[in-house]
Amino acid sequence: MTEIGENYIFKTAPIPGTPEAMRIWVLGDFGRGNELQKMVKDAYVDYTGDRHTDVWLWLGDNAYQVGSDQEYQDIVFSGEWGYQDILRKWPFWTTPGNHDYLSVDGYYTNPESTAGPYFDIVHMPTEGEAGGVPSGTELYYSFDHGNVHFISLNSEVTWILFEESVMMDWLRQDLAATTADWVVAFFHEPPYSKGSHDSDDAFEAFMTGMRENFLPTLEAYGVDLVLAGHSHVYERSAQIKGHYGLSSTLTDNNFVDDCNDWTNKKEPYYKRVYADDSLKGTIYVVCGNGGSQDEGAPLDHPIMCSTDDGIGSIVMDVKGDTLISRYLNGVGEIVDEFAIVREMYPVGMEDYDLEVKEMGDLLLYPNPTSQILYLRYYLSKNSAVDMEIYDLSGRLIYTESYKEAEGKHFHYYDLNQLQLSKGIYMVDLKCNGVRQLRELIGVY
């Protein structure tokens, strides 16, 4: 990282494929020029503190009402609501929204047009300069950051209403070519939502087009996460597959993971990279409330496990085989959190006895660890569980109590969130009348 003066920072991206820890900030429908926009920005700046933001994703509708050059200058790049201070430090990658397109020449006549303020202001890679297959256009593109491959699709052009298009051809080539551990797609109009926009509404043709025509390809190539805005709420789905119709057509076969009471679980989504296709799915997240808010939305789409009609943004951390996403509201509270873990188990836990019928040994992995701690254990019956972490002086550092059903359980903990410094700790797990102590070594 290079500092040029006190407020200007430049940091080059890691070599593609490098599993370097990264922080990603996701912001949608933010350019309102209002106090809500400023609240969301300030909440994230306070939350991330000195932690550098490696990737900043804009999910569209970046400047209201029509995406004019003057609106971008007044609302995004300057003024009391703007991002001029952090634009000096953090790189952004963007996708256009319907409001941005109101000032794009040729919206209804030439879907290949890149004239207008949005395309004059942003300059995204067209020749694969940042990784990925060259798209030849700023309408859509891809880039690599470390071991994550990002794909920006354009949901505002008539191509998405058809099964075949130049964007679809490029998307298939790009997905087939990437060897990144993680693949994240982002665009403006969500395929699933019951927020300020309803994906079942016949008038939402572009939302329907993305769902029917592009989701089968994204899922077929194993995209891990899809991010969208447009609907001025926060919604997060179960891990699903093969659902491209109205919400009323959803069946149990579309769910890869159980969606019940997901917001109260610490167990992550498993991305079963080498499993049968029936065990693979994608998570869909809507976050279109970075400055826009529509309270009282139904928020009852059956694939969504967590919803909120306030304001907020997404803070995402990726390190190695783990992706952790947190929804940060406008007053700096974490309202939702989930993790995606590649494989059934992290490397080193393959020998866990899946056939054990009594409570097996508590497994900690990795140990020593610098960021993420995984706990693995088995319950022979429904049980209350108490998990505590102590330092060597006996001081209680962290405690958590919950109830779990019979079966195998796999939990994750972010040691940075627990504020564990370098040292030795004891993990104490009590359930079913059994107590197990394990030594944990924290390294930084």
Image: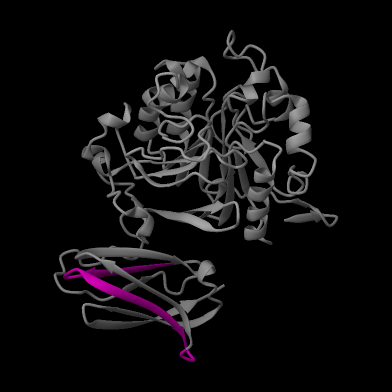
In the rendered image, residue 117, in percent from the top left (x then y), is placed at 72, 23
Instruction: Tell me residue 377's x, y (percent).
Output: 27, 70
Residue 306 appears left or right of 83: left
Q: Position of residue 74 (x, y in %)?
A: 78, 34
Which residue is outermost to the bottom? 393
Q: Residue at x 48, y 87 (%)?
A: 395
Q: Quadrant of the C terminus?
A: bottom right
Q: Which residues are magenta?
A: 373-394
Q: Is residue 392 magenta?
A: yes
Q: Whole-percent x and y of residue 289?
A: 56, 41
Residue name at image x 31 percent, y 65 percent: 349
Observer able to see residue 319 = no
For the N terminus, the image quarter is bottom right
Instruction: Label the magenta part by its dominant secondary structure.
Output: strand
The reply to whether residue 2 is in sight is: yes
Above or below, 112 relative to 90: above
Q: Is residue 234 left or right of residue 3?
A: left
Is the residue 314 above or below the residue 353 in the image?
above
Name which quarter of the figure residue 200 lies in. Answer: top left
Q: Is residue 91 left or right of residue 140?
A: right
Q: Nearer the viewer, residue 327 or 348?
A: 327
The residue at the far right in this view is 5
Residue in front for this viewpoint, 161 or 385: 385
Q: For this view, does 371 lie left or right of residue 110? A: left
Q: Is residue 144 magenta?
A: no
Check the image and tell me how it is coloured. Answer: one colour
Please give the name of the residue rendered at 41% of the width and 28% of the height, measured from the top-left corner. Answer: 199
Q: Looking at this view, is 203 or 241 the one in front?
A: 203
Residue depicted at 20% across the width and 67% down the height:
353
